[in-house]
Image: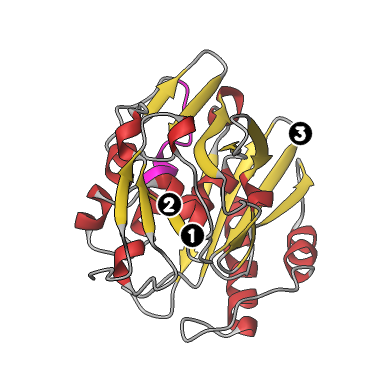
């Protein structure tokens, strides 16, 4: 879609070049920006010229740039010790979009857009990722992605802040994980996504897609079915749209969570 209200597109090469305001927006893949009118915008600031490496593997942390495309992440060569790398493709496919979108849609854009069915949000929260946010004073702040996304299309990002990357501890990557997804139709938008991850002393379940914000359910190392059911029942913000009613989403989340408990037992 043509954004007829725009006056210019600026190329950013450093943090000092950003200069965002209420009438400007960062541009990476642009798959959402160009999908509908943006009458309030006068300027786009291109982040793809920043030269950020899509993925960096360090001894203690994996860094995924906000401008890393879904394609780059899906086709990443196997990383030694990443026991849950299969989650990348499972989450990416839960977008239920043409794979051509993977060439443009970015990890950071998907998270910052904060849609309930944001597949990269599901991945990041499941792996306990930390968001690295550039602030307008040239500094940065860190916040769990789980807390960065606060609701449908709402985040803690200020209008002049930019999501730079997400970081995942290598110790977390080594933990086994299982994925569950349900939709009303075979090719339909995700109704609920539940991801389980086994830590040395707990079973961690994350619920996304069917809720207005990500939920993490921390359970004991050996929970029973009642423990899982109570944890899911405590969620009180099930999303309501044509892709699933709240009571259906809650029921499906309970089934997926129990299946994952058994798989990771």
Identified at 42% across, 22% down, the residue is 56
Q: Position of residue 26 (x, y in %)?
A: 42, 49
Label 3: how many Cα within 10 Å (few below 14, some 14–19, many 20+): few
Quadrant housing residue 197: top right
Residue at image mark 3:
201
Label 1: how many Cα within 10 Å (few below 14, some 14–19, many 20+): some
Cβ atoms at labels 3 and 1 below 8 Å apart: no
Residue at image mark 1:
113
Identified at 68% across, 46% down, the residue is 204
Is 196 placed above or below 182 here? above
Residue at image mark 2:
109
Cβ atoms at labels 1 and 2 below 8 Å apart: yes
Q: Is residue 85 magenta?
A: yes
Q: Is residue 200 magenta?
A: no
Q: Which residues are magenta?
A: 81-89
Q: Quadrant of the C terminus?
A: top right
């Amino acid at each position: 879609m043509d954004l007829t209200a725009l006056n210019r597109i600026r190329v950013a090469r450093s943090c000092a070049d950003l200069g965002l305001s209420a009438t400007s927006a960062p541009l990476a893949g642009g798959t959402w920006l160009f999908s509908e009118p943006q009458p309030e915008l006068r300027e786009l600031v291109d982040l793809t010229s920043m030269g950020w490496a899509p993925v960096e593997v360090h001894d203690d942390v994996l860094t995924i740039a906000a401008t890393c495309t879904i394609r780059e992440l899906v086709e990443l060569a196997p990383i030694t010790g990443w026991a849950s790398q299969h989650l990348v493709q499972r989450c990416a496919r839960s977008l239920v979009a043409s794979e051509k979108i993977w060439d443009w849609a970015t990890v950071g854009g998907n998270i910052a857009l904060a849609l309930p069915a944001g597949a990269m949000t599901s991945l990041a929260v499941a792996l306990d990722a930390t968001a690295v946010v550039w602030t307008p004073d040239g500094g940065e702040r860190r916040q769990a992605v789980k807390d960065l996304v606060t609701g449908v299309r709402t985040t803690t990002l200020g209008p002049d802040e930019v999501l730079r990357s997400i970081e995942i501890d290598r110790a977390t990557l080594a933990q086994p994980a299982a994925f569950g997804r349900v939709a009303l139709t075979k090719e339909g938008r995700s109704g609920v996504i539940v991801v389980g991850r086994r830590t040395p002393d707990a079973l961690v379940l994350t619920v996304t897609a069917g809720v207005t914000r990500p939920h993490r359910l921390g359970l004991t190392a050996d929970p029973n079915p009642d423990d899982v059911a109570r944890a899911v029942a405590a969620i009180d913000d099930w999303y309501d749209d044509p892709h699933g009613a709240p009571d259906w989403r809650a029921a499906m989340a309970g089934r997926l969570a129990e299946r994952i408990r058994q798989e990771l037992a």
